[in-house]
Image (spheres, rainbow, N blue to C red):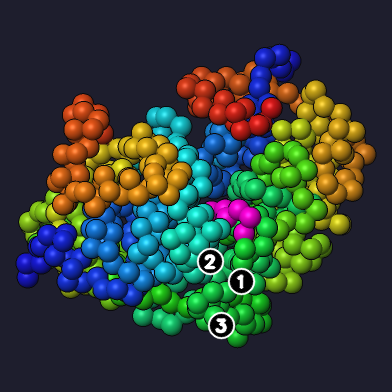
Amino acid sequence: MTHHPEDYSKPELMACCGAREIADGDVVIVGTGFPTMSANIAKYTHAPQAVLMQESGVYDARPKRPALSVGDPCLNPGAAMIGGLVDVMGMFLQAGWVDVGFLSGSQVDKYGNINTTVIGSYEKPKSRLPGSGGANPIGSLARKVLIIALHDTKRLAKRVDFITTPGYIDGPGARERCGLPAGTGPAAIITNKAVMKFDPDTREAYLATYHPGTTVEEIISLTPWDLKIADDVHETETPREEELRALREILDPFRMINIYEGRGYV
Amino acid sequence: MNKVMTTEEAVKTYIHDGDFLFIGGYICRTPFAVIHEIIRQRKKDLTITRSNAADDFDMMIGAGTVSRFIGTFLSLGLYGLGRCYRRSMEQGIPQKIEVEEYTNLSLPMMLLAGSLGMPFIPVKDMAGTDLLKVRAFMGDNKFKLIDSPFDGSPSVLVPALNPDVAIVHVQQADESGNAQIWGIGGDCKVGANAAKTVIVSCERIVSREVIGKDPSRTIIPDFKVCAVVEEPFGAHPGYTPGFYDVDFSFGSFYQKASDTVDGFHAFLDEWVYGRKDRKEYIQHYIEQFGYSAFDKLKAEFDYGYPVSYSY
């Protein structure tokens, strides 16, 4: 029988939620933090043939410590291939070979659109953010996009201030109409409270599972749109023993995941 | 042809106010020695480009050398948002720079087009987003939307970029400029080859014979290069594979310094204006943080092994 230990943190639960969205053999493009942890949990448990790459040009790295950036030198030794941005973002991602990508952002809306450009107006920003980087191409071109977000009414928005990265834009068919490849787009928003998935008809995010310690009512109150609830809504499966072992013993012995608690992922 | 010179000479001779620069280095191999010299010589009105910019571009913007930025991203990574970049965009300090925003797919593709001598290239990203609603100094030439003449599908066309000068830091180069890298490439190869000329900064100058022992590593042929400068630790506080690691504590030091305008200027005075060249910078680093901190940055292991090109 599957064993679910009692002691786990919210970031660990979120990393496991991400891992469970990855299938064996998937080609996964990852950034640092949650994406790396999720992809590696999947690789060490149910998806040993999943392969990871970083947009900087690295394919199938075997780092001896968790990478602190997508260009961390620990990604170099032992990788199967190292090229550059045109290789990974062009020949692999744009050409349609990437199955799963992970994204986060300062604002996420009900269609899974992401803002990493500006809070307030573009011309006179309240807060100027980093910009797209690799987010837009990953959100535009990966088959399945998993979004990591803090669950509050500031981060989740009815409508983001600026669409840096497309989700389903303004509803069904919008991606295809503007030329994005069919069969791509956000699959889930994984927050510190819940997992939301996207309705295939309306393309809006709805509540699929809620994490232990919260309620459907609380999640509705923290979500700024009229959140639909899945008929079979239920509690999120807590981390399995083998998932936690992969994370704690193999992937993250220095417990770098704890920084997410400091950033409010509790 | 021997193109070896000092960084001071290379910047004085080949970089002019108003130039358009590609500055290589995707987290690794950032040409910091040359960047400091550009700031030191108080170059003005530069346009700068590269995918994923960090403390390097933040510093150039804060120092007032930059007017325009063709970018995708600017952040201090682990240390959060770029402070000088934010002050420029939010408060106009020291000036509000103009930004043309692309992505880590579209910008390298624009450099690829430039390196291939093509006027534009189609990309599959940016469609449907606000990135296509904002334009700055490039105006209508930021992008064009067309229906593909082949299958009618909506397509985004982006223009080729051909910078006046590319500045790249590499592991090794010969005296005439054949430049070799290993490890993460970022957009260095396309950026350098898109430019009209290249300043190569390197960890070590080697002979043409050494270059010929592993020619697959060469990303820039010497005919494209105008200057070769030897700057050991030239990418500090970033890293160069095989030579040294990222200096995380210096990253934190820069973040704290650049939190305020005064702190940033004190940083520039101490580490850039107050140091004649890279050698003095390294000496100052050792005085400030100790030789053991400096020594700890050096790469410990050689994971590489020589390949055979025999036949």
Q: Position of residue B271 (x, y in %)?
A: 26, 46
Q: Nearer the viewer, residue A20 or B167?
A: B167
From the image, which quarter does the C terminus of chain B lie in?
bottom left
- Please provide the residue range marked out in magenta: A125-134
The answer to whether residue A262 of the structure is visible from this angle is yes
Spatial CA span between label 3 and label 1:
10 Å
Q: Is residue A128 found inside the magenta-colored segment of the image?
A: yes
Report crowding for label 2: few under 14, some 14 to 19, many 20 or more residues within 10 A (C-alpha).
many
The residue shown at (50%, 78%) is B138
Instruction: Give the crowd class for mark 1: few <14, some 14-19, many >=20 residues within 10 Å.
Output: some
Residue at x 63% of width, y 46% of height: A104
Q: Is residue B86 above or below residue B149?
A: above
The residue tagged with tag 3: helix, strand or loop? helix
Q: Are marks 3 and 1 on the same chain?
A: yes
Residue type pointed to by label 2: Glu
Disc 3 crowd rating (10 Å Cα; few below 14, some 14-19, many 20+) is: few
Q: Are marks 2 and 3 on the same chain?
A: yes
Which callout, 2 or 3, points at the residue further toward the start of the chain? 2
Nearest the eye: A127 or A117: A127
Q: According to the image, label 3 marks what residue?
A: B140
Counting the numbered discs, the total is 3
Residue bearing the label numbered 1? B134
B219 relative to A38 in the view: left or right: left
Q: Nearer the viewer, residue A263 or B297?
A: A263
**Marks 3 and 1 close (CB-CB < 8 Å):** no
Looking at the rendered structure, the secondary structure element under dot 2 is strand
Residue at horizontal 19 percent and vertical 34 percent from the top? B286
- Determine if the magenta segment contains residue A47: no
Query: Where, by quadrant of the figure, is residue B40 drawn?
Result: bottom left
Q: Are marks 1 and 2 in contact (CB under 8 Å)?
A: yes
Q: Quadrant of residue A111?
A: bottom right
On the image, numbered disc 2 is attached to which residue?
B101
